[in-house]
Image (spheres, rainbow, N blue to C red):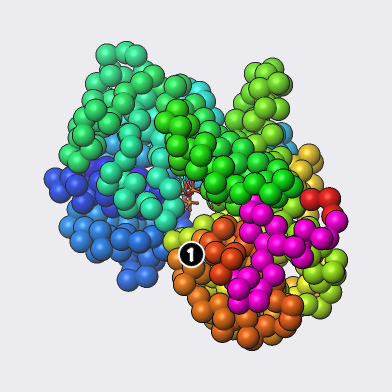
């Protein structure tokens, strides 16, 4: 059997590497239009940082796993073609700021239609709007030259930073197919691939539209849990309750469960925001405005939370950060990844720079080049109410952005430290050393509840931790957050 995956990104690369590892008799080719990305997959420095991934790639590459820019050759030879291209939010035109941009998806579908000479199972791996499978079928069959295509939806649930573990031991593998004999047969072929390592009771076959929608709903549910606990974090700060204790108490109820209840200054990443926006848009297109507004609230609370964090920082520091050095620890959207797509750190940096702070940013996996690129890139405005593109930072503001080689360098001479992602190394820093090198009073704003506030207060820091009882200093400052 030959499998080809179109799109060598965060999903296509690792997913296919694990299939190649677990199915030695299957030939797996990952193809991409990006020459740079394919070159990186063929090198010793993979294009993405993901614990455990290199070993798997190194084991399979040259055996039954290849990375290539020859899209046409590998697609035409394959029995199963996965489409794993990016489906970002549209930034212009109809549905801008909400709808999924299916440009890349359509170009992949047209390539399959153009170059295929034999029957194929085409698998939607990308996250797509519900009923995209129908459009896929139309593109393929309108150009079919008598070829038989079976369409399956097989959304991916991996999370970055834990990709390899998630792929090796998934909670479930979802396979959506049409309820025709041919559709069911195709689903069985894909099921047999996964059955090489996934227990059968974890491979769920359902209808195509349910599979497509389940992916958007799964992400919306996870994000909703974070926004729920984040909204409560604001109430905890106002009342003296501790959000970690509340989350633990609530999560102990087996009907609720403990996961995704870690309060933070806001969630980010390439999936949650764009997938909820897509869900909202689909609801609106179906005339379900109340349902759309319900899910939109998850994003509104996320924006509220990022904004609230910035206000806490500025208001606590005498309501002015002009010219003050702020150490920003963490730039990727979470630990154990170098991915900065939709990282909430950008919004916090932007908020601080608006008040004319000077930033010194450090992330163990994000380069200076990437940080500066992200901060100058255009982005939709915060409330997503218009499709206007805003330049995130002016050239003057960019002069206020510096990067550091480590946390100590970032904090040297700083007025405050903002902890904005949860890298393990931020838990283990020598905070006494950091305190001594900072301007006084020295502040720490922990946006991920990484440090123990009491231990840092004992050193002398003024500490703000999301949803935790407020430091007397922070409390005494009356500001609407
Ligand atoms: P990505 O941007 O990392 O990778 C997509 C790749 O597709 C890029 O390298 C791009 O060059 C390539 N591509 C685009 N059009 C192409 C074409 N016509 N022919 C060949 N290559 C083409 O994206 P990703 O993070 O891997 O996400 C892929 C899909 O999976 C998205 O729909 C995303 O929502 C979904 N998803 C992502 C994650 C995640 O954690 N990143 C998790 C689950 C699902
Ligand atoms: C998510 C889904 O978890 C995954 O199933 C899907 O396939 C892709 O989207 P990912 O975006 O990689 O994965 O990371 P995830 O660990 O879910 O975190 C997303 C964001 O939520 C991060 O910014 C993270 O820091 C934040 N988060 C997560 C919280 O703020 N609190 C939590 O309790 C959990």
The residue segment tinted magenta is 456-478
**In the current view of this chain or complex, which residue is farthest to the top?**
180
Query: Tag 1: Cα neighbours inside 10 Å, few (<14), some, or many (≥20)?
Result: many
Q: Is residue 15 left or right of residue 7?
A: left
Report the residue marked by disc 1: 423
Residue at image coords 28%, 19%: 184
The percent coordinates of residue 10 (x first, y second) are: 43, 53
410 shown above or below 297: below
The percent coordinates of residue 157 (x first, y second) are: 41, 40
308 shown above or below 109: below
Residue at image coords 52%, 36%: 250
331 or 102: which is nearer to us? 331
Q: Is residue 321 visible?
A: yes
Residue 174: image quadrant is top left
Is residue 465 shown in magenta? Answer: yes
The percent coordinates of residue 132 (x first, y second) are: 50, 27
Residue 419: image quadrant is bottom right
12 or 239: which is nearer to us? 239
176 shown above or below 471: above
* Helix, strand or loop status at disc 1: loop
């Amino acid at each position: 059997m030959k499998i080809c995956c179109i799109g060598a990104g965060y999903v296509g690369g690792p997913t296919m590497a694990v299939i190649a590892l677990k199915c030695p008799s299957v030939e797996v080719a990952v193809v991409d239009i990006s020459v740079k990305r394919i070159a990186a997959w063929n090198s010793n420095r993979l294009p993405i940082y993901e614990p455990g991934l290199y070993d798997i790639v190194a084991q399979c590459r040259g055996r039954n796993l290849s990375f290539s820019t020859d899209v046409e050759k590998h697609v035409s030879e394959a029995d199963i073609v996965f489409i794993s291209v990016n489906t970002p939010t549209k930034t212009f035109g109809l549905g801008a700021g909400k709808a999924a941009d299916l440009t890349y998806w359509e170009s992949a579908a047209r390539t399959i239609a153009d170059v295929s000479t034999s029957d194929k199972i085409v698998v939607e791996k990308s996250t797509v709007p519900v009923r995209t499978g129908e459009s896929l079928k139309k593109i393929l069959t309108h150009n079919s030259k008598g070829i038989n295509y079976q369409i399956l939806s097989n959304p991916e649930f991996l999370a970055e930073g834990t990709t390899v573990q998630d792929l090796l031991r998934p909670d479930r593998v979802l396979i959506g197919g049409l309820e025709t004999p041919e559709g069911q047969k195709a689903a069985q072929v894909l099921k047999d691939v996964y059955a090489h390592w996934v227990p059968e009771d974890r491979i769920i076959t359902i209808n195509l539209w349910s599979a497509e929608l389940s992916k958007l709903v799964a992400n919306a549910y996870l994000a909703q849990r974070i926004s729920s606990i984040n909204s409560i974090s604001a109430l905890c700060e106002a009342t003296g309750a501790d959000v970690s204790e509340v989350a633990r108490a609530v999560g102990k109820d087996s009907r609720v469960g403990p996961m995704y209840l870690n309060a933070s200054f806001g969630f980010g990443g390439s999936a949650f925001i764009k997938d909820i926006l897509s869900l909202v848009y689909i609801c609106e297109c179906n005339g379900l405005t109340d349902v759309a507004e319900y899910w939109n609230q998850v994003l509104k609370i996320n924006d509220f939370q990022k904004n609230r964090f910035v206000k806490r920082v500025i208001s606590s520091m005498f309501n002015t950060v002009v010219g003050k050095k702020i150490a920003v620890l963490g730039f990727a959207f979470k630990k154990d990844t170098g991915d900065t797509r939709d990282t909430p750190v950008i919004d916090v940096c932007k908020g601080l720079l608006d008040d004319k702070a000077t930033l010194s940013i450090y992330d163990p996996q994000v380069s200076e080049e990437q940080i500066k690129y992200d901060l100058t890139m255009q982005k939709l405005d915060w409330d997503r109410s218009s499709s206007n593109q805003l330049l995130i930072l002016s050239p003057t503001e960019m002069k206020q952005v510096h990067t550091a080689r480590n946390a100590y360098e970032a904090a040297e001479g700083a007025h405050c430290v903002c902890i904005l992602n949860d890298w393990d190394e931020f838990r283990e820093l020598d905070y006494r050393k950091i305190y001594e090198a900072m301007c006084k009073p020295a502040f720490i704003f922990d946006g991920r509840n990484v440090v123990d506030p009491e231990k840092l207060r004992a050193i002398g820091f003024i500490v703000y931790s999301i949803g935790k009882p407020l430091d007397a200093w922070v409390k005494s400052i009356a500001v609407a957050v």
